[in-house]
């Protein structure tokens, strides 16, 4: 009986390591998927109702969104430095 438990111990430990690796991968994949879902489902911001010369509200929303994206992109790179 003791010999059997000595033989099974390394296999049991390897199985536990594999289970932990799978759990870590699932945990990380979930967070990445959540981030992607949030980016996809994020609505465009509403602009105040003002009279802008020659620009439609759609153009302004697009410009505002692009500025927000570029500032996030810039801050992401600055934090790496």
Image (cartoon, rainbow, N blue to C red):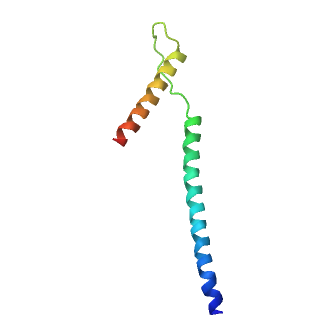
Q: Nearer the viewer, residue 10 or 62?
A: 10
In the picture, which quadrant includes the N terminus? bottom right
Where in the figure is residue 53, as x and y percent of width and height? 45, 7
Query: Which residue lies at the image location 54% right of the left edge and 43% below the top edge?
Result: 35
> On the picture, is 31 further left or further right than 4?
left
Q: Nearer the viewer, residue 44 or 37?
A: 37
Number of marks drawn: 0
Where in the figure is residue 26, as x and y percent of width and height? 59, 56
Query: Which residue lies at the image location 57% right of the left edge and 56% below the top edge?
Result: 25
> On the picture, is 56 further left or further right than 76?
right
In the picture, which quadrant includes the C terminus? top left
Q: Nearer the viewer, residue 56 or 16?
A: 16
> On the picture, is 79 further left or further right than 55?
left
Which residue is farthest left? 81
> On the picture, is 2 further left or further right than 74?
right
Q: Where is residue 23, by image quadrant?
A: bottom right
């Amino acid at each position: 009986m003791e010999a059997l438990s000595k033989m099974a111990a390394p296999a049991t430990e390897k199985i536990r390591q594999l289970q932990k690796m799978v759990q870590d991968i699932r945990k990380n994949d979930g967070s990445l998927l959540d981030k992607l879902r949030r980016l996809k489902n994020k609505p465009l911001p509403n602009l105040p109702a003002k009279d802008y010369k020659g620009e439609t509200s759609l153009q302004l929303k697009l410009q505002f969104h692009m500025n927000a994206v570029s500032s996030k992109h810039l801050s992401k790179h600055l934090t790496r430095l």
